[in-house]
Amino acid sequence: MAEHADVVVIGAGIGGLTTAALLQERGFSTLVLEKNRFPGGSCSAFRKGGYTFDAGASVFYGFSDDDAKGTLNLHSRIFRKLGVEVPTIPDPVQIHYHMPNGFDVPVHYDQNRFLECLYRRFPHEKEGIMRFYMELESVYDILSSLPAGSLEDILHLAAVGARQPLKAISLGIKTLFSMGGVARRNIHDEELLRFIDLESYAWAVQDAQSTPLVNAGICLADRHHGGINYPVGGSGAIPAALVKGIEKFGGRVLFGTEAEQVIIEDGRAVGVRLSGGGEVLAQAVISNATVWDTFDKLVTDQRHKVPEGKFVKAPSWFQLYLGVDASVIPKGFNVHHILVEDWSRYDELGGTIYFSAPTVLDPSLAPPGKHAVHLFVSAETSQWESYDRQSPEYRSKKDEYARTLISRTERILPGLSDAVELMVTATPQTHERYLNRLDGSYGPLLHPGQNVLRKPQNRTPVENLYAAGDSTFPGQGVIAVTYSGVSCASYVARQLGRPLDYL
């Protein structure tokens, strides 16, 4: 027998959970289907040997207590609406960058303190630095004054345009520009431009020329307003709170339940067929899968297959989770670090090391006297496809590569190799298996020069089938997929006759 709900959501990633939570709070019956036994996708956590590790994401925007600060302050507003508390710890430095030639930059919450680091290194570029980062501030000022909603909702756009016509027009103009184009109009020093490329690559996995100015305005300005805040208990606290919100209002999240196919009748999505048998019928189906996994697997009609080359496929990751003796982390050490040894390789697979030690903020994530450490680099499934995942050779190769990464990281953390007491590794194949993502990819990216509005929105070519997550506007990152969830919930709610109130 088939189950019934107003809305069925495929995947308990942050985009899908946000959509379901807001719709359920509004009074729609929602059912979320999740293959794994835990929520969150790449924003989840796992325990091993007494440690709690962030599976992926660990830099979080949108948790300011002050609604006057932070780009839409989405997490705080959503959890307030749901009546669910997520305690957080402020992180005074977003990321500490370590680059060639002794170029070190900690990105402080205090913007003046951050900019002073750049002024000291590039006194001849002071005016250009000010103009560039003030341009990002102007984008932030527009975005933070406009309510979140669907760009496909004509009534929403009309309301925003009527209330803030000049800002709406200005934002439309700014969608035409890239972060790199604006940087290069104001700055000429090649080393500084490389740093700006790295600022972009750190969250967009593309250089600044390929990154829309609007996206940069969200991430690179908000860190100095709403700040970076780490959830107590690790990244898994965010999806756990969203699940709690869904269930609080009567919705359900079914773990260990994999969607096999979107049921389409007469060109309209009417439900989901489950891999273990059974169906869920609904008025609206929302996919939190990537655009490839949605239209190359869940939707079987070949007319909707995603053309090869339509998007740039972002790489996946090789991830390394370490339990280490606390003595290796010096006093005053920042939580997040990015390490570039050679500018000519920073955007190659494995060329940049990303590092976090969240126990600097939340010691409860590790046993007493220990720290939890997370290292990762970009990677592809093709690098590991020749190995049998059950073979000793595969495990040996992972350990060998992990030791290489640990050794490279000793540039900023001497003695790390000797301090390791627990090591867990994950290849792109691991991401593909757990996250149900094509090649474990970080998701689809626009081609360089494409307008950010070319990013798919929440509607799809199939009637009543919608999308949320990093395949949709605005793109990658936890705060971005949260926005996509707000946008999707807003659009679906209006289509079903009960519009959401603005957050």
Image (spheres, rainbow, N blue to C red):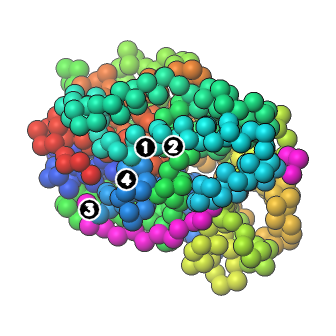
How far apart are the two marked residues, 3 and 4, measured between alpha carbons?
12 Å
The percent coordinates of residue 468 (x first, y second) are 37, 39
Q: What residue type is labelled 4?
A: Leu
Q: How crowded is mark 3: few (under 14 residues within 10 Å), some or many (20 or more)?
A: many
Q: Is the Cβ of the residue at disc 1 closer than 8 Å to that at disc 2?
A: yes
**Is 84 part of what is drawn in magenta?**
yes
Say if 250 sits above or below 499 in the image: below
The residue identified by callout 1 is 141
The percent coordinates of residue 94 (x first, y second) are 61, 57
Q: What residue type is labelled 1?
A: Asp
Mark 4 or mark 2, which is nearer to you?
2
Compare marks 3 and 4 and give the one earlier in the sequence: 4
Front-most of 478 and 216? Answer: 216
The residue identified by callout 2 is 137
Front-most of 275 and 398? Answer: 398
Q: Which mark is residue 82?
A: 3
Mark 3 or mark 1, which is nearer to you?
1
Q: Is residue 431 left or right of residue 374?
A: left
Compare marks 3 and 2 and give the one earlier in the sequence: 3
Determine the secondary structure under disc 2: helix
Please give the range of residues in magenta. 81-102
Determine the secondary structure under disc 1: helix
